[in-house]
Amino acid sequence: PGVRLVVVHPDKEVLAQAAAARLLTRVLDVQSVRSPVHVVLTGGSVGIATLAAVAASPLVPAVDWSGVHLWWGDERFLPDGDPDRNETQAREALLDGLVAEHGLPAANVHPMPGPTSVATPEEGAAAYAELLREHAGDRPDDHPDEQSEGTVAVPAFDVLLLGMGPDGHVASLFPGHEVLAAQGTTTGVHASPKPPPERVSLTFDAIRSAREVWIIAAGAEKAEQVAAALADGPVSEVPAAGAVGQARTLWLLDAAASTTTPK
Ligand code: 6PG
């Protein structure tokens, strides 16, 4: 794994603004050397606030959105358009505007399938794995040293965003859950401790194939698991500890999430 950096911002609002600025800068930087750019989105309040901050940025027109692909780390197994789908929230916060006004091809938005198109989370996971495999050929030729990623049939994710739950879960990889052992690049999830019970998620292998993993977390209720993950706690108890990028892992925190207070 690459380097790990921890960045602390004063509060959740500044965190979202800074994460948005970082994301736009990262996309611009990558676009100066290669195309397409692959970004994996997260749900959660900070994740969506970050997308809303991207939408409001004056840098939006600087990005060549025609060369950007957007994926998801996990999705709630709910019908298309359901307000609780990460996809729905991301479309409203950012993606609809990028498609309508900034040249993002609708076909570059890759939501995880739900019950509108497949019968089970497993079918959704299999369909998404196939889609990821189809884009695994989007390998840059300017980084021939990155062949270690080649064993995982997913595109070279330039940035993979993750929120973290107060229980330390990332994507839909929950502590103590059988999903932690899932093989391949995607998995169906049942009996999630957080509703809804059925989901689709990337696996650790897919997450760890990303060049950069950015974990965005705000609030005092996250502090204990942030500290546990940064202390490299066991992935079975703190799944976030297992979310590391090939080149870099960034922990983007607000002050409340970065300080553990004794109980
Ligand atoms: C879910 C949530 C979850 C979320 C984190 C962080 O799985 O249902 O979307 O994965 O990303 O709980 O959420 P907040 O940013 O709202 O704290």
Image (cartoon, grey):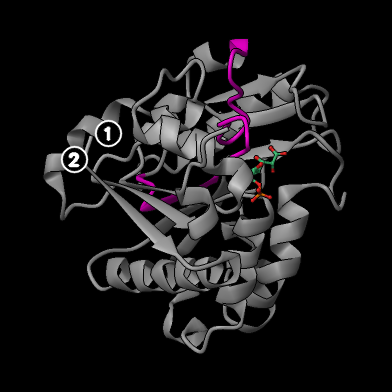
Q: Are marks 1 and 2 in contact (CB under 8 Å)?
A: yes
Please, which residue is most extreme toward the front here? 263
Asked whether residue 195 is drawn in magenta, I would say no
Label 2 within 8 A of ligand 1 by Cβ: no
Q: Quadrant of the C terminus?
A: top right
Residue at 35% from the left image edge and 36% from the top image edge: 244
Image x and y of residue 70, in percent: 54, 55
The answer to which quarter of the image holds residue 37 is bottom left
What stretch of residues is rendered in magenta?
156-178
Which amino acid type corresponds to the residue marked 1 in the rendered image? Glu
Q: Which mark is residue 146?
A: 2
- For label 2, the SS is helix
On screen, residue 129 versus residue 248, left or right, reads right
Q: Which mark is residue 9?
A: none
Q: Is residue 77 visible?
A: yes
Q: Please identify the dominant SS of the magenta region.
A: loop
The CA distance from mark 1 to mark 2 is 6 Å
Q: Which mark is residue 149?
A: 1
Above/below status of 218 relative to 152: below
